[in-house]
Image: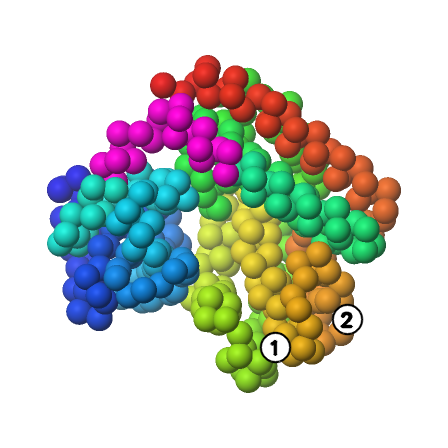
């Protein structure tokens, strides 16, 4: 730990020192691909920051320091200062402490290390994944009832992604965007659930892809990102009236540093032959962009935001070609009612199987 801390301090110690001067008694750690020793040339350094600034929600922001890209994850103090929130377990598990004058981050990390692979803690985390999966599936039902098939399929996919986090956790693998598909395959191999892996690929509509196809998705992602950023610039007054958390999401997601990271990592994945992973990576970054964009559209009309009409809102013509490019990235071109019903049914079946197997898998592979 001390050796790793010294190495990373030598890289970004100046940035940490500046941050410490600005924050209220912060604790700072580094997590992610750099501490897992899986960083690539495009990888950002992921910083975990908890301070007594009074924030009651987590958020992300970009920074650059000495040629390095930093992805700063700010979390509420009470997530580690009191009872350790399960949501932060993975980040604490892989973290290297860089600044912790009160020892709060170190104690939280120590708690996680003592309990990370216990059946009780794994059960708590995996139950959370399934609750999130159920939330997305409820949006699927509402979107289907409204006839918004694109939105239904996207949230069905998201429901399945959340459920597969159960498999990653039980198998002791990280939950990441950059290697999600590869890690799910490894988890399914380890747990003897390869059928679930191939069923998931069917739900994702990515069973057969080639490099040209994924390269075209990369182009569509960039076009959608640029269209959304331009739209946001033109809607500054609407954005200023949004909740602080939403304003921060807009800034984070439309920062050119975000586009550079996504484009760079996707190119690397193409070079590595991880085609399905690259497609899912693009989708994982695009969905929150679409959500904040739709939120701004509906706020500008004076309407309450509705997740279950996401693509319908995008398709109503206020945002240029964003809808068409997004449909391409998510593989929704030409999807009809029968296709949607089949995909949703497939998603429900895989999620139900994971739910039914969860406790058996924990007993067999944890502790």
Outermost residue to the front:
82
Write the residue at 38% across / 52% down.
43
Residue stretch in magenta: 109-128
Q: Is residue 169 something that shows in the picture? A: no
Closer to us: 23 or 336: 23
Q: Is residue 339 something that shows in the picture? A: yes
Say above or below: 41 vs 253.
above
CA separation, marks 2 and 1? 14 Å
Marking on residue 231: 1
Outermost residue to the top:
364
Q: Position of residue 225 (x, y in %)?
A: 58, 67
Write the residue at 36% across / 40% down.
89
Residue 147 position by quadrant: bottom right
Label whose residue precedes the other's in the sequence (2 or 1): 1
Write the residue at 79% across / 49% down.
144
On the image, numbered disc 2 is attached to which residue?
316
Q: Position of residue 139 (x, y in %)?
A: 69, 50
Q: Secondary structure at mark 2?
A: loop
Q: Position of residue 29 (x, y in %)?
A: 25, 51
């Amino acid at each position: 730990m001390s050796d790793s801390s010294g190495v990373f301090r030598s890289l970004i110690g100046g940035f940490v020192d500046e941050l410490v001067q600005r924050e209220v008694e912060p604790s700072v750690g580094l997590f992610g691909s750099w501490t897992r020793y899986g960083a690539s040339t495009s990888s950002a350094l992921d910083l975990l920051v908890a301070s007594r600034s009074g924030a009651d929600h987590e958020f992300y922001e970009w920074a650059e320091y000495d040629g390095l890209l930093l992805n700063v994850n700010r979390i509420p103090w009470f997530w580690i200062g009191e009872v350790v929130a399960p949501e932060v377990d993975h980040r604490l598990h892989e973290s290297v402490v860089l600044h912790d004058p009160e020892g709060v981050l170190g104690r939280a990390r120590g708690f996680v290390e003592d309990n990370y692979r216990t059946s009780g803690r794994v059960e708590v985390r995996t139950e959370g994944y399934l609750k999130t999966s159920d939330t997305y599936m409820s949006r699927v039902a509402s979107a289907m009832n409204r006839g918004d098939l694109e939105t239904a399929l996207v949230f069905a996919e998201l429901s399945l992604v959340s459920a597969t986090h159960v498999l990653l956790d039980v198998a002791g693998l990280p939950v990441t965007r950059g290697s999600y598909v590869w890690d799910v395959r490894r988890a399914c191999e380890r747990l003897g659930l390869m059928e679930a892996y191939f069923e998931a690929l069917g739900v994702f509509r990515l069973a057969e892809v080639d490099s040209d196809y994924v390269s075209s998705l990369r182009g569509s992602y960039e076009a959608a990102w640029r269209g959304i950023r331009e739209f946001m610039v033109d809607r500054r007054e609407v954005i200023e009236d949004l909740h602080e958390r939403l304003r921060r999401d807009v800034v984070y997601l439309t920062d050119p540093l975000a586009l550079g990271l996504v484009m760079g990592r996707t190119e690397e994945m193409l070079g590595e032959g991880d085609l399905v992973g690259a497609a899912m990576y693009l989708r994982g970054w695009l969905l929150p962009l679409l959500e904040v964009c739709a939120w701004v559209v509906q706020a500008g009309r004076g309407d309450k935001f509705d997740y279950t009409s996401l693509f319908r809102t995008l398709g109503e013509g206020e945002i240029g070609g964003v809808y068409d490019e997004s449909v391409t990235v998510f593989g929704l071109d030409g999807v009809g009612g029968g296709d949607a019903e089949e995909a949703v049914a497939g998603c429900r079946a895989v999620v139900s199987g994971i739910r039914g197997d969860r406790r058996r898998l924990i007993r067999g592979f944890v502790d």
